[in-house]
Amino acid sequence: MSDLLTILVVGLLLGGIYGLVSMGLNVIFGVVRIVNFAQGELVMLGMYGAYLSWHLLGIDPYFSLIIVVPALFVLGMILQRFILQPLQNEPFMQIFATFGLLMLFQNLVLAITGGAGYSVPSDVARQVIRLGDINISLPRLIVLIAVVAVAVGVNWFVNNTMPGKAVRAVTQDRRSARLMGINVEWAFMLTFGAGAALAGLAGVLLAPIYTLSPQIGGNFILAAFAVVVLGGLGSVWGAFFGGFIIGFVEAFAGYYFDPALKHAIWFLIFIAVLIVRPGGLFGIAGAEEMGLREQD
Amino acid sequence: MSKTDTFIPQGGSKPRKGRAQVTTFGTELVRILGIGVVFAILLFVLRGDPFLLNILAYTFLFGALATSWNIIGGFGGQFSLGHGVFFAIGAYTTANFYFHWGISPWLSLIPGMFLAVIVAVAVSWPTFRLKGPFFAIATLALNEVAFVLANYFDLITGGPRGMMLPFKAGFANMVFTSKLPYAIIMFGFLLITLLVAAAVLRSRLGYYLQAVHLDEDAARASGINVLRVKLSGMAVSAALTGIGGSLFAMYIRFVDPPTLLSVQDIGVKFLLISLIGGVGTLYGPLAGALLIIPLEYQLRANLGGTIPGFNVLILGLLLVLFALFMRKGIVGAALSLWERYKGKSHE
């Protein structure tokens, strides 16, 4: 019984991590209709941002949010404006370009750091909350709280604010949105910026949990794809619940089968869902094809 | 024009006077023969230089592999990121046959090839329902599954430690003391791949694949069995990729998951080479390999030691730049220059 409870808690906390990492990817996909292969690298940049802030300025990684998140927002806007906007109706070239960015960022960090692993010290990271037999590390709990806050926040923003409504209009029909006086390019830039900022947020919050390496983005990007596809493309709650599904699958597979195979198991589930229900469990059927429709 | 931009109409776009010029397999045969003669001379000239022969062998091998990828990825427009799986199947099959039973790699090319085809068809059957980026994501995930499995089943793959293939020089073992025989083998493989790709491109299958690439729904409406066409293209592509994997394993005499199943070093490299040369053109992938492989070696030799990852960084940058500014690759750009030149000379 306590084993089961432990697995559930581990799964829940893992789910929080996966959900948070996937939020940005899903926001970008949902609106701009671009599958950003470089999203994991944006998370990685966020982690290194937290490290740099600690190393240069000596501030606690959690406070580096005020620097890293805006920085990635700007980076996201730049990427959208100069790389992805020219490829708006070129889904194949988007794959090439975002994969190129993945290789670029990863190896840029590798070239600068020489591949040494860093860890970001934080007083918070060492705190553990004990609930009976179960130990919950505080950084993971913070991630879990953050993912709930982000899901609620994004949902509120999209439904209740004017810019949010504009973004939804752009998502539904670019041409009509343009006719209503919405600057579609700006909406895309802001959305891509927001997606990158969410990746930065995830990176900062995960920095105390993981050892930093340039390749760490690769661990996140496939998890994020799995989450997004499982939960539903372009659906905020889809990414939220998809994260927990993957988290639980990984926790249970790691316990009942073999930890070495846990990734293979959720990849297989991911491929199965992708094939049976490409729109995802919470997504709108056919949403996966919208990105391929030509729009102007 | 999103789907047509990577596609280059063959045989010129302007109607010409006199007999209609149709590029057939015969035309391509002559061109491939020409390419063969040039490379044969190059091989002869460089026969005493092991460093350059090594680069040449890799250029031929990756040119051939990118050409194989291009059959389904370029002609058929199915952007697979999972060709590393078929590559690894060929490599592991040959390695196992050689390591455990001492069977000649020349013979185990065939089971490796068939195994690659079987796996390719089995996994593509369901994944071909997906389009564009989603197909790419699914094949990327497939590559990751293969990576995990290759690490796990160490009885077959040697696990993370890999398998070192014993050095027993001899023609039957495909193990040689000099680089020249390897370069000649890769050269032969390149010629075979080009011939197969030309035969596919200039056959019914090739035209069907291009139709599916341009507009899948229209192709289906015209009575093309889209799934069968994609599967056939994938089977041919995977068969050649499997052979390439076998040759690669015998060349470096070492197989392990990071070497065979790294997305950046193997899976994406086929796409990258094809994009830089010209996706969907017959000779584009070869042109891409002629540029990329020597460039990568140069970068690795000069800067790889001092700045880790610098060679991949440059490749990533090239990928972005070509996606932005040269979507038709070297061959596409050269063709449009040629068209413009001819257009001027007519007036």
Image: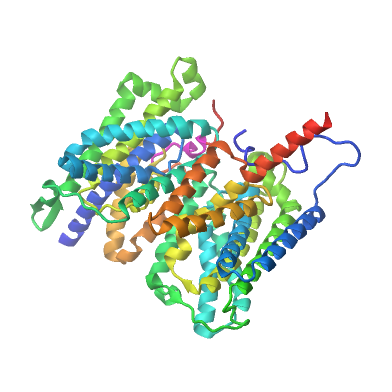
Q: Quadrant of residue A191?
A: top left
Q: Is residue A137 above or below residue A182?
A: below
> Image check: B184 left or right of B87?
right
Residue A93 visible (yes or no):
no
Q: Is residue B233 above or below residue A149?
A: below
Residue visible at 34% across and 42% down in the picture: A42
Q: Quadrant of residue B338?
A: top right
Whether residue A287 appears in magenta in the rendering, the answer is yes
Residue visible at 35% across and 53% down in the picture: A215
User: Which range of residues does the magenta coloring cover?
Assistant: A282-291
Residue visible at 43% across and 43% down in the picture: A101
In-front residue for pair A136/B59? B59
In-front residue for pair B23/A154? B23
- Magenta stretch: dominant SS? loop
> Image check: A7 left or right of A213?
left
In-front residue for pair B347/B259? B347
